[in-house]
Image (cartoon, rainbow, N blue to C red):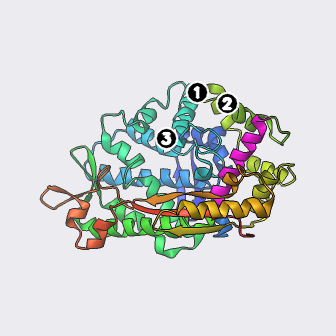
Amino acid sequence: MSKYKIINDPVHGFISIPDRRILQIIDDSAFQRLRQIAQMGLSYLVYPGAHHTRFQHALGAMYLMGKALDVLARKGVEITAEERLAALQAILLHDAGHGPFSHALEYAIVPDLHHEEMSLAVMHRINRRQEGALDMAIALFRNEYPKKFLHELISGQLDVDRLDYLQRDSFYTGVVEGRINAERLIEMLTVHNDRLAVEEKGLYSVEKFIVSRRFMYWQVYMHKTSYMFEKLLGQTLRRARELFLSGEKIYADEDLAWFFKRDTGPIDDETVERFLRLTDADLWVHLKKWISAGDRVLAFLARSIVLRRPFRIEISRNPVPPSYIDEIKNKVYRSMNVGKNDTDFLVLTGTMSNTAYDRKRAPIYILKKFGRPAEFSELTDHAYMQALGERTEKHYLIYPKNL
């Protein structure tokens, strides 16, 4: 294996990988699988350029982690060579547990499993192969290492994960309003009392970061059309599972069938192995097969996704009245010739929410010139920045257009 690699990334430029231990992770099949996992789920049905993958994002986050560690070391923060390697390993694998279409199928294939739990299981799997080489990386990922600021770089309000995906998703969607200056933010990072902080002169860069994050969530990640398709995808999997467990003959390969039959339980080796065999391509094969399924509901859902036949989605600030939901379900029942219980798969309602800056759970601290840290929203001179720390919630109703 070559000792030195350079990857040409369209967002960050050349990414250097001089360490063989990092290359071992990149070459691992569990990491290579991320080439086949869409970073933004079905967003490319709205933004045609958004075909980038979790593989690209993981490499970009690793690159920014290296930059952040360099900046902190230059400012006198003690970071050993082993800690640096562990931080790079942890951020490289932080999304290894994502299933097909990333967040679109969170809990749909494995109902009781969050992707971070699977990422941790994948880390343990690779760690066994490499005879304990990831022990420190796992401790950092789980926030069990004494230097807490290293975990905050992996998972926090200003972590390198967010710094990369905001830049990358803005680039591939063409949504320029979401762009941030990650290099500037990283240069402003510092550590105070073992916690990550931002120098006072970086205050406005943090403001821009929070505004961009809010914009990307409501304009891109929760764009009503891509959000609708992702909800339909989840419903399609649930319908297929219900039919499969009831004995209906539907197409399901060995791995998806195994998850259909799986009961809630611990993440054992077989769960990890089968999960890592599922990619976007596998789900597309199933969706195409299900178009010709004997079940009208499953076929209709699959056809709507594959042929891009969007449902109608209504979004409001107030909860959808139950009487209106019943009215829509009755129309679906009468016009589509499906069972009354089947309308639950075709008429979806729920809430969508976002908090651009969660100051209560994980505040961003600004380190003033004389060393006194202050919470970000206390220093900003824009009232609306404080409002961005509040949870925004909207209600949706999704149903077929042909009513």
Asked whether the residues under the numbered discs 3 and 2 touch, taking CB atoms below 8 Å apart as contact, a structural biologist would say: no
Query: How far separated are the C-alphas under marks 1 and 2?
Result: 8 Å
Asked whether the residues under the numbered discs 1 and 2 touch, taking CB atoms below 8 Å apart as contact, a structural biologist would say: yes
Image quarter of the N terminus:
top right
Image quarter of the C terminus:
bottom right
- In front of the other: label 3 or label 2? 2
Question: Which residue is under mark 1?
Answer: 265
Query: How far separated are the C-alphas under marks 3 and 2?
Result: 31 Å
Question: Which residue is under mark 3?
Answer: 89
Image coordinates of residue 182 in percent, x first then y, are: 41, 63
The crowding category of the residue bearing disc 3, from other C-alpha atoms within 10 Å (few below 14, some 14 to 19, many at least 20), is many
Give the numbered dot on residue 387. Answer: none
Q: Secondary structure at mark 1?
A: loop
Question: Which residue is under mark 2?
Answer: 262
Query: How far separated are the C-alphas under marks 1 and 3?
Result: 28 Å
| Residue 28 visible in the current orientation | no
Q: Kindly report the secondary structure that dominates the magenta region of the rendered protein.
A: helix
Looking at the image, which is closer to me, 21 or 141? 141
Residue 293 against residue 12 in the figure, above or below: above
In the rendered structure, which segment of residues is drawn in magenta?
Answer: 228-246
| Residue 307 visible in the current orientation | yes
